Image (cartoon, helix red, strand yellow):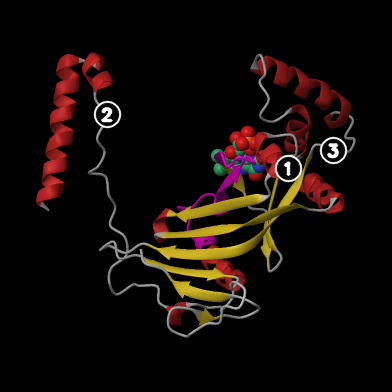
Amino acid sequence: MIRDQFLSMRIFISSILRRTYGNSFSRKMSIDIGGMRLRYKDKDDTFLEKHLVSKEPFGQFKAWFEEACTKKEILEPNAMCLATATKDGIPSARFVLLKGYGKEGFKFFTNYGSRKAKELDENPNVAATFYWEVLNRSIRIEGHIEKISVEESTTYFHSRPVPSQIAACASYQSTPIESRDILCEREKVLEAEYLIPQKEVPKPEFWGGYIIRPRSVEFWQGQRDRLHDRIKFRKPKNGETPDGKLLHQGEEGWVYERLSP
Ligand SMILES: Cc1cc2nc3c(=O)[nH]c(=O)nc-3n(C[C@H](O)[C@H](O)[C@H](O)COP(=O)(O)O)c2cc1C
């Protein structure tokens, strides 16, 4: 409480100083947003082991994802932050849209020439994170990536609106381009070739899908007192057997454990 008041006071003083001394002042200091915090779920709304709807991660993912889809405040429940890394371990992250999930894994589509795809070529390890703010929930997936079949990519490509298909053909994702006009020019040429005569747009070879094959999936729910709940499903290490205390037997080759927040 006293700390909150202290932080609000600091933010107030900073804003006065900035107004008085202008940008030269703000350039010299970092902006303190330490007072920004939300209240998460109350103590009587915890996420306990008995609340798991499934003892393997896909069933649990389905339950939380479907709940996220019912919330009108969440416009893109399928948006996930995808992290990749070079072979030297230098990471990069960006959002992509989840386009399918099931026991086999989590699917998304992109340009196979993009930065992420180049990193995936040299290092198949990925991590993906969902955050659904109004539910105070996050899901973390870690695993490795595989390309999905050309047939499946083609079927999905043709299910997209035609302007999106054309945009995928026009963009050499992640490469520098001189101006937006060049993109629009490419789009115009492709529209004349396919959109106006209503011809099917061929899926470019450089575009397709990936599937994340998870080795761990963690379910996080934020609590007001910051004693958050974390239940992680993972594949057991060689020779590891659940003791029913720290490590629990799941289903379909999975074990699960509660992690400290
Ligand atoms: C909400 C959201 C969803 C996105 N979905 C995708 C997607 O499904 N596929 C994709 O290639 N890029 C998507 N993007 C764009 C990427 O974040 C990124 O700019 C692009 O893939 C290039 O990333 P890279 O240079 O790291 O390869 C999305 C961006 C946002 C903000």
Q: Are marks 1 and 2 in contact (CB under 8 Å)?
A: no
Tell me the tag on residue 30.
Answer: 2
Q: Is residue 222 above or below residue 93?
A: below
Residue nearest the viewer, comparing 239 with 202: 239
Place of residue 199 in the rendered image (x, y in percent of width and height, measured from the top left): 90, 35
Residue 85 part of the magenta-drawn span: yes
In the image, residue 251 lies in the stretch drawn in magenta: no
- Asked if residue 227 lies left or right of residue 65, the reply is left
Mark 1: amino acid = Asp
Residue 148 in picture, x, y percent from top left: 79, 53
Q: Earlier in the sequence, mark 1 or mark 2?
A: 2
Which label sits in the foreground, 3 or 2? 2
Dot 2: within a 10 Å radius of its alpha carbon, few (fewer than 14), some, or many (20 or more) residues? few
Count neighbours of disc 3 (C-alpha within 10 A) and say few if under 14, some if 14 to 19, many if 20 or more. Answer: few
Disc 3 residue type (three-letter): Glu
Q: Which residues are magenta?
A: 68-93
Task: Kindly state the secondary structure of the residue where label 2 is placed.
Answer: loop
* Vertical arrangement, residue 131 with respect to residue 28, above or below: below
Q: Badge 1 is on which residue?
A: 121
How many numbered circles does the render carry?
3
Residue 59 in the image: state x and y as whole percent.
60, 73
Whole-number angstrom distance, CA of label 1 to CA of label 2? 38 Å
